Amino acid sequence: MWHLKKDTVERWSWAVPITDIGCKNTIELGNKLKLTYPLADLSDNIVRPFQNKSATLPITDESRWIFETTTKVLLDINEKFFNYDLLYIDELRFCVYEEGDYYDKHTDMQYESTGVKKISFLINLSDPETYEGGDLLLHFDKEPTVSKRDLGSMTIVPSFYMSEITPVTSGTKYCIMGSVIGPKFN
């Protein structure tokens, strides 16, 4: 393989943009939100593609630093590896995965009225010693790649790749998920 640009194109990347204190503060902020299951009525026993509580993280004086930090990392990684034309972060979702919660295999790539989801990301807010399961699996090849679980780590992947979060088997996993919108691909 001969790359046309001097930088190698990567399928995914990760960084550790948030400190332990930042993770703790984000969890406290997120737990003040009205967390709901997106598909609220779970009594019908229908198998759903995901089950976890979440809420959109609003832009406030308390949360502004999270948006600024996330934006800086996304722009740096995009410039280094992906070179996508990007417009905005769709939203930051504060997510809570308790025992039994999961997110089945899926892609995030969706067309919006203003463009397409190009980059998806997850920021792990939990100490990996405090929960079991809840692994972010990235499906690039026959065998999935297990993403980093480090406290404060941010996994960044093009939205057209398959991913999933395995069921949490004990403890609670806190994270922020989001997508970046850009103009339609040429």
Image (cartoon, grey):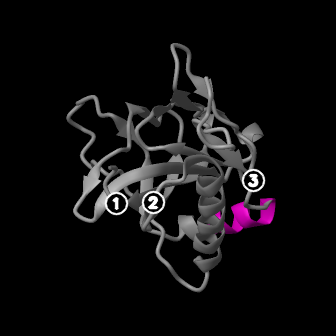
- Residue 123 placement, left or right of 129: left
- Residue 146 placement, left or right of 111: right
Kind of residue indicated by mark 1: Pro
User: 95 or 5: which is nearer to us?
Assistant: 5
Span shown in magenta: 20-28
Q: How far apart are marks 1 and 3 (CA)?
A: 28 Å
Residue sitting at x 50%, y 53% = 95
Residue farthest along the bottom direction in this orientation: 61
What percent of the width, then of the height, locates residue 71?
A: 59, 67
The answer to whether residue 148 is above or below residue 79 is above
Label 2 SS = loop
The reply to whether discs 1 and 2 touch (Cβ–Cβ < 8 Å) is: yes
The answer to whether residue 34 is above or below residue 36 is below
Splitting the image into 4 quarters, where does residue 12 fall?
top right
Label 1 SS = loop
Mark 3 — residue? 16
> How many other residues sit within 10 Å of disc 1, few (<14), some (14-19) or many (≥20)?
some
Kind of residue indicated by mark 2: Asp
Residue sitting at x 79%, y 61% = 19
Mark 2 — residue? 85
Which mark is in front, 1 or 3? 1
Q: How far apart are marks 3 and 2 (CA)?
A: 24 Å
Badge number at residue 35: none
Q: Distance between the residues labelled 1 and 2?
A: 7 Å
Residue 35 visible in the snapshot: no
Which mark is in front, 3 or 2? 2
Splitting the image into 4 quarters, where does residue 17 fall?
bottom right
User: Most prominent secondary structure in the magenta stretch?
Assistant: helix
Mark 1 — residue? 183
User: 47 or 65: which is nearer to us?
Assistant: 65
- Residue 170 placement, left or right of 20: left
